[in-house]
Amino acid sequence: MDILVGIFQISLEQGLAYALVALGIVVSFRILAFPDLTVDGSFVLGGAVVARMIVLGYHPLVGVLLSVLLGFTAGCATGLLNTRLKINSLLAGILIMTILYSVNLRVMGRSNTPLLNYTTLFTPLEQTEMRWLFVVLFFAVIVFGSKFLTDLFLHTQVGLAMRATGDNEQMIRTLGVNTDRITILGLGISNGFVALSGALVAQHQGFADIGMGIGMIVAGLAAIIIGETLLRAKTVTMNTFAAIVGSFIYRLTITIGLWLGLAPTDLKMATGAMVILALGFPALKKGKEERFHLRGV
Amino acid sequence: MDLMLVLQNLRKIFHRNTIDEKVAINGVGLEVKEGEFVTVIGSNGAGKTSLLNLIAGTYLPDEGKIFIHGRDVTNLPEYRRAGYLGRIFQNPLMGTASSMTIEENLSMAELRGRSRGLAWGVTRKQRVRYQELLKPLDLGLENRLRDRVSLLSGGQRQCLTLLMATLSLPRLLLLDEHTAALDPKTAEKVIHLTDRIVRENHLTTIMVTHNMVQAIQFGDRMIMLHEGKIQFDIHAEEKKNLTVEEVVKRFGEKMLLEDETLLCKPVGTR
């Protein structure tokens, strides 16, 4: 029984910590229909920037804000490559992701920055009796706050234009919207969330590492697919909620897998297989035309 | 009366200097008065859609100039002309965002050509107004404001598109065979609704159609395109007395129209 509670606790904590990645991917893949691969780089960027700032003696909050800002910039860069230089969306993301690898090494000055001896946002929470509860609450406030703000934004005039850009770009352009600018903005927001997640995860786990972003896209997609399938999400608010729920269930599956003896080295393979199955299964099923429609994939 | 649209010697060539080179528009000059309803007819490849694309700025002309209400828009990108233009395509799927609701689509259309901010996308006031607007369509859409557009039929979507295109009273309404993909009964409903909205709001309109009867029955001026040139331009009085037989006689002799267009039966009797 204790083990089950432990599994649940770990999964909830991890699920919330990585939920912002899924939320970011909802904005790029789902809302804008833009398969943005910058994520693997901007996640590390968030962690690297906050780690460096903390080591340099800045308040962790300053580090987090700078992380979000730089993540936003990285997303805009991908958007610019795609819209202004007409580089294919997948390639634009891969280019920025690759460039960020060097940037992140520059930022940290090495491949791993431990934070265990520094004060992070989690230090005050770690010192209390109810450590787990406070950490989870802390994450929950940030994650659901971000979800709420995203929902609000996507129902404003600009937000409607952003959703229409992913839905019917030709139509919204004839209504006078500069869809290039909207795409750049959306990718900025998306990667801002991803960098925020990276900044929080680095502090939570006590180090930033150059490899911490590998497979982040696929994990985020898995979370979204799980969440949307379970919740049958059709509206924007359900999409963002599904990302959070999916993130938790994805981590739960992984934690249970590890407990049952799945080798941690095989984790990414298992996740990849999960996404392939979810995307490909409906295509193989005869008589059912309706393919699992993940926009942007 | 002011001139709403002036085209001066427009030319557009696709795939220039290749084996596929095609002169889509070959020196078109046209003056459309404010409030005029012009129908454009011609066979496949005559340049009807290319002409609308040039006016809308989907692509830029190789030669010539375009003025909308006196302003030179020849080199303005599509999204910056949007404030002047309303446009409906043949494909009902093209005019609406299907994953979004009816009211969201209407709201986006209402802001045509204006700057968009962080104000709420659909306000209560707008919702009431949209209900009033949708009621005369007699499709029951006024009670389905929050339904996603993907739930609507092609005809319903095209009616919604029509409303969206005219909601902000554009200087110029461009209709690109907007009833061609609909079943005859729905097509008739949409074309009559179009006529009503155009008349009520005195919208300057250019309607491209494949259907000769439609081209004769509606509008107060008819233009025929062939191989990227204007072949005939029939004005008000003459057009009123025009019959299909006469058009067939005049145009058919010259072999300018395809059989398909000539044989097109009157709307609704197909």
Image: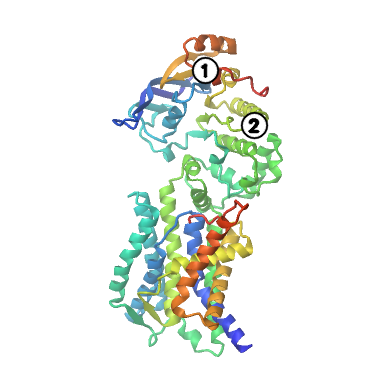
Please name the amino acid that badge 1 sits on: Met
Disc on res. B183:
2
Please give the name of the residue rendered at 45% of the width and 25% of the height, measured from the top-left corner. Answer: B45
Q: Mark yes or no: residue B238 visible.
A: no
Q: Secondary structure at mark 1?
A: strand
- The residue labelled by disc 1 is B222
The chain that hosts pointer 1 is: B
**Compared with residue B117, is residue A111 higher up or lower down, i.e. above or below?**
below
Please give the name of the residue rendered at 51% of the width and 61% of the height, measured from the top-left corner. Answer: A26
Please name the amino acid that badge 2 sits on: Asp
Which quadrant: the N terminus of chain A? bottom right
Marks 2 and 1, how far apart in space? 24 Å
Q: Position of residue A9 (x, y in %)?
A: 57, 82
Q: Position of residue A202 (x, y in %)?
A: 42, 77
The chain that hosts pointer 2 is: B
**Compared with residue B268, is residue A21 higher up or lower down, i.e. above or below?**
below
Q: Quadrant of residue A46?
A: bottom left
Please give the name of the residue rendered at 36% of the width and 62% of the height, measured from the top-left corner. Answer: A74
Number of residues whose C-alpha sits closer than 10 Å to that of mark 2, classed few (under 14), some (14–19) or many (20 or more):
few
Q: Quadrant of residue A131?
A: bottom right
Please give the name of the residue rendered at 49% of the width and 70% of the height, measured from the top-left corner. Answer: A271
